[in-house]
Image (tube, rainbow, N blue to C red):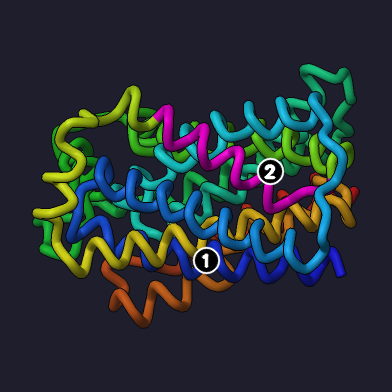
């Protein structure tokens, strides 16, 4: 059952990447994040109410788990999602989803650094495979002229190469840093959520707590509260509803993901959940007409990342 929950969560996250890509082309991330996070709260509250009516009770309050869910909201709903939305806008859903597969990698590294868990030679080798795969995913072949289908990140990288920048500057391009920060934030949040759900089996309430924290932080640091109503009133209607759909999808995926951690080891739930490129690549190719310039290098990079992460988790 845990595998099924994680798989359903992965499918929803994959669909959300395409929805987010379409939404960012119509409406800014600042107001889009607010809409999405608000829908997270509204939808999860409704689900919690239905769940309470069906069960007739709530698990006894657990302060430690509550605090873990609270802090996880900082890393997932706020930092992780904000960096992730920026990554989708800059790199596109296919490449963004591949960088997200490094989430389990960060989970293993954090466990090694903080909890003192050692890494075998095979896992270190897998780390190299993952990093090499990420480089291939981001690789942009130098072009004499830039075309209209070149995305923002590829355009800047291509221009930089035409000016003689070194490959190392491409590897550590700011957009890639955003992608890796998103993955790192989600990894920390996953560890916190996985610990919390073992102590307090309330996945819907846990997701709701994280969503409230994320929205409050976003309203505090990323936008002017006094302009929210005006921005929503002037917002592109198609973009608005795409972010509403995104919010509904993401909170459902989060609840399923948290629930799967109760039945599976966090690492296994994470590797299943982060296998979104398997779905995102074909969807992005056909729906977005390969605007991201997916090539055999991209596909090879995806396979290397997935292979490396599976070695890390399963060996």
Residue 200 in picture, x, y percent from top left: 84, 40
* Residue 208 magenta: yes
Of marks 2 and 1, the one in the foreground: 2
Residue 206 shows which numbered tag? Answer: 2
Mark 2 or mark 1, earlier in chain: 1
Look at the picture and state if 73 lies above or below 16. Answer: above
Q: Which mark is residue 235?
A: none
Task: Give the percent coordinates (x, y) of residue 96.
Answer: 44, 52
- Residue 14 - label: 1
Q: Hey, which quadrant is residue 259 in on the image?
A: bottom right
Counting from the top left corner in percent of width and height, residue 184 is at: 58, 33
Question: In the drawing, does residue 146 fall left or right of residue 153?
Answer: left
Q: Is disc 1 placed on a helix, strand or loop?
A: helix
Q: Is residue 294 left or right of residue 280?
A: left
Disc 2 on helix, strand or loop?
helix
Query: What range is drawn magenta here?
Result: 201-217
């Amino acid at each position: 059952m845990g595998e099924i929950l994680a798989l359903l969560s992965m499918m929803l996250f994959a669909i959300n990447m395409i929805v987010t890509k379409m939404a960012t082309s119509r409406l800014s991330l600042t107001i889009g994040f607010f809409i999405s996070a608000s829908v997270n709260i509204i939808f999860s509250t409704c689900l919690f109410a239905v769940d309470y009516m069906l069960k007739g009770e709530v698990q006894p309050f657990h302060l430690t788990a509550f605090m873990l869910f609270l802090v996880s909201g900082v890393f997932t709903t706020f930092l992780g999602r904000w960096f992730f939305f920026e990554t989708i806008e800059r790199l596109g859903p296919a490449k963004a989803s591949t960088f997200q597969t490094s989430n389990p990698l960060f989970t293993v590294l954090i466990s090694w650094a903080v909890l003192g868990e050692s890494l075998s030679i095979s896992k270190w080798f897998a780390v190299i495979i993952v990093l090499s795969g990420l480089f291939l995913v981001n690789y942009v072949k130098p072009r004499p002229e830039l075309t209209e289908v070149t995305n923002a990140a590829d355009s800047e990288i291509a221009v930089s190469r035409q000016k003689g920048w070194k490959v190392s500057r491409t590897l550590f391009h700011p957009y890639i840093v955003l992608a890796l920060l998103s993955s790192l934030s989600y990894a920390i949040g996953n560890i916190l959520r996985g610990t919390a759900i073992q102590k307090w089996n309330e996945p819907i309430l846990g997701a709701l707590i994280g969503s409230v924290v994320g929205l409050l932080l976003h309203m505090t640091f990323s936008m002017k509260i006094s302009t929210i109503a005006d921005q929503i009133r002037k917002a592109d209607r198609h973009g608005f509803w795409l972010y509403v759909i995104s919010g509904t999808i993401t909170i459902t995926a989060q609840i399923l993901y948290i629930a799967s951690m109760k039945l599976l080891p966090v690492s296994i739930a994470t590797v299943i959940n982060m296998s979104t490129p398997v779905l995102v690549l074909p969807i992005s190719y056909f729906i977005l007409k390969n605007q991201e310039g997916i090539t055999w290098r991209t596909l090879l990079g995806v396979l290397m990342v997935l292979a490396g992460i599976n070695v890390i988790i399963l060996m």
